[in-house]
Image: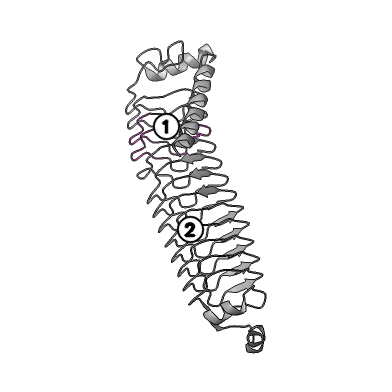
Amino acid sequence: MWAFFNKIKDKNDSVEAAAIDGQKNQSGAVVKKIQKLFVRGPSHTEDGQLLIQDLSNREFQRENLNGFSFSKATLTGANFYYAQLENTILSKTDLTDTNFEQAKICGAVLHDAITVNTCFKSADLSASRFFNNDLKSANLEGADLKAAELLNCDLSNLNLTTTNLDKVVATCIQANGSKFDGATLNQARIKNSGLRRSSMFSVIGRECDFEKSRMNDIDCQQAEFSDTSFIKSDIRSGRFNKSTFLKCDFTDAIGVEADFTRARLYRSNFTKANLRGAKFIGAKLDGVDFTGADLVGADFTDADLDKAILSPEQLKTIKINSTLSQREVESSL
């Protein structure tokens, strides 16, 4: 595991070094502009290192600072409202109480940055890189995190409502108790992560990957997922009421007492899943494969089982009073 993180860190360090090399070729006009903004004199040495480390409470509102390195600087309380910060280096930077509302920070490197009470509200963080960040107190509401990388980050109890998480790559993150309501998750990869007690009410996700993620007690009602993997995920006591799942894979998932009441599932796979005590009351189960699944005590009352794949042994262990006719049940037994 540590070898994996070291590999990612080396990648981020190389990106940072490349950005600093690029700074050496900045035009004289841009350098003079930065010098004026910093007031105290030259902003960078010839090798691209920031000279002025303490930039607390400075005003950079609407300024163009694309490509610059603030690595290891103190930006506590600084205001970057609506600023241009594409491909900037903010690694190991103190961003406590820093304001990036509506700023364009796409492609930025923020690994090991301090983000206490940092405001990224409605900011463009697409393709940005976070590594080993504690984001619990940051504001990411409405932010654009499309294709961003988040590795070993803590996003617990965050408000991520309406956030764009399309194509995000999030590995080994903690987002327990966070709100993803109304977010888009198309092609998002959130693997081996903690999503306990989080809320994904009415989210839309296509071709997502939640493999081995811990999603127990999640509130995922009225959501829409297609071609999504929940393989070996833990969805115990999760609430999936009135949600739609098209060609989703729950193979080997732990779904004890999960609630799929009135959900619509089409050609989805629950092979070898543990669904003891799960609820599929009034659910539509068109082409759903329960081969080898543990369904002891599961409730399929009023569920549409006409095209579901269930063995005679499984039918004996579930509660059933469904649109599947009694004659068909008896004949299958």
Residue at left offset 46%, top offset 17%:
33
The residue that mark 1 highlights is 80
Look at the magenta stretch and give its main secondary structure.
loop
Q: What quarter of the picture does the C terminus occupy?
A: bottom right
> Would residue 127 be found to the left or right of residue 137 on screen?
right
Does residue 49 appear in the picture of this structure?
Answer: yes
Q: Quadrant of residue 172?
A: top left
Q: Nearer the viewer, mark 1 or mark 2?
A: 2
**Part of the protein shown in magenta:** 93-119
In reply to whether residue 118 is colored magenta, the answer given is yes
- Give the residue type at disc 1: Phe
Looking at the picture, tell me which residue is in the foreground, 11 or 283. 11
The residue beneath circle 2 is 200
179 lies above or below 3: below
Front in this rendered view, residue 37 or 146 = 146
Which numbered disc, 1 or 2, marks the residue that appears first in the sequence?
1
Query: Badge 2 local density, few (<14 within 10 Å), some, or many (20+)?
Result: many
| Helix, strand or loop at mark 1 | loop
Judging from the image, the colouring scheme is one colour
> Residue 139, relative to residue 289: is it above or below?
above
Which quarter of the picture shows residue 110? top left
Label 2 secondary element: loop
The picture places residue 187, in percent across and down from the top left corner, at: 60, 49
- Asked whether the beta carbons under mark 1 and mark 2 sit within 8 Å of each other, the answer is no
Q: CA distance from mark 1 to mark 2?
A: 30 Å
Type of amino acid at the residue the image marks with label 2: Met
Nearer the observer, 112 or 83? 112
Q: Is residue 100 above or below residue 207?
A: above
Q: Position of residue 37 (x, y in %)?
A: 41, 20
> For the point 37% across and 38% down, which residue is it?
118
